[in-house]
Image (cartoon, rainbow, N blue to C red):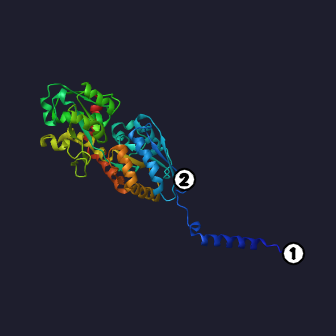
Amino acid sequence: MNRKKLSLGSMYAVIGLALLSSSLADPTRAAEQPFYAGKTIRLIAGFSPGGTVDIRARLFARYLPKFIPGNPSVIVQNMTGAGGQIAANYVFSVAKPDGLTLLHFPNSAIVNAYMEPATVQYDIRQIVILWVGADSWTAVTNPKVTQVRKAEELARTPVRLRVGGTGVTSMRSLRPKVALELFGVDHTWVTGYGGSADLLVAVERGEIHLFEDPQDGYKPNIQPREKEGTVAVLWQTGIMTSDESFKRSEVLPHVPTLGEILAKDKKTGPLWEAWKAAVAPQAFQYAIGLPPAVPAERFAILSRALEKMTQDPAFREEFQKALGEPPDALVGEPANRLVKDAVKKLLEDYQAGVQHLRKLAKK
């Protein structure tokens, strides 16, 4: 049987018709693939596995992919060192701004920009913030040693208070010291403790008399001891709002803020500015950020995905169980604007307070 050979043009026509027929039968083939389809997002965590930053990052990595068009993979990469600063320097000054590298970080990456600028390799005003969570911190004492159960009793304590902290530039170290200065209470500053567990043991032993602890440690660690009478909570930092008032945390609605307790005549001058500068970052205690100059459409895609994830019942339940607080957060442009406004205040409006904090750290 004779077979007619197709010309090259006829062959291309046949192939074209076949492709057209295929795309009509399956319209999704004709549509452009989402940017994140088939890609892998790296979520950098600047701390070791097992800590709260790592726990949150791994929760994000598990839940976020299903809310991003294209269902990319999300992997957690622990990049430790310098209290998270190595990871921040990498993401905000080295990583490509392509929307494929994110950083989950505590506010130290922002605080360091004005407390330890020599360690920071990026312009904090240019980073892009996707998601922020607030966190109020409590001042904890041992009432059996200090005979203090309320902040108003600090002036009558029979002991010279020893205030415990971690690093000298850490806000959890500086805030209780500033608070006692505002109260006019003589004290000694003892830093170098590893974290909450070490500080709690130290206050129970009487090595120190007062330290600051995050709200997520209240229910598992502080509240049981409070009921036993071995610790007392004196105040919380609260979350500073845009009008410079202090809002009680919903996790600690019964604990007053220092701003509520302190006498009106104390809330003025460089020392009060130092308190505001130390509390302002609590509005973004932990965050997810992107390198500067990331494309706007990818910022929008990730913002929508994080908003949906934050409202997902399964995510909220697991987050609450793992971290002891709800995953309530600001997402997208509201989060970005919150941090930008706070950074402006810290770099411009609160300079007297920032200078006081720097002097305390040097001492």
Nearer the observer: mark 2 or 1; the answer is 1
Task: Give the x, y percent position of residue 154.
Answer: 15, 32
Find disc 1 in the rendering and name its residue: 2
Q: Is residue 132 above or below residue 148?
A: below
**Looking at the picture, does residue 35 appear above or below residue 166?**
below
Tell me the number on the disc at residue 300. Answer: none
Q: Position of residue 84 (x, y in %)?
A: 41, 38
**Furthest residue toward right:** 1
Between residues 336 and 14, which one lies in front from this camera angle?
Answer: 14
Q: Categorize mark 1 by other alpha carbons within 10 Å: few (<14), some (14-19), many (20+).
A: few
Q: Position of residue 290 (x, y in %)?
A: 44, 49
Q: Quadrant of residue 176?
A: top left
Q: Nearer the viewer, residue 335 or 268?
A: 335
What amino acid type should be assigned to the residue bearing mark 1?
A: Asn
- Does residue 178 appear in this view? no
Count of numbered labels shown in the rendering: 2
Measure how far apart labels 2 and 1 are at the Cα level. Answer: 50 Å
Relative to 169, 290 lies left or right: right
Residue 261 in view (yes/no): yes
- Does dot 1 land on a helix, a strand or a loop? loop
- Say which residue label 2 marks: 39
Q: Residue visible at 50% across and 51% down?
A: 100
- Tell me what residue is drawn at x 18 percent, y 40 percent: 269
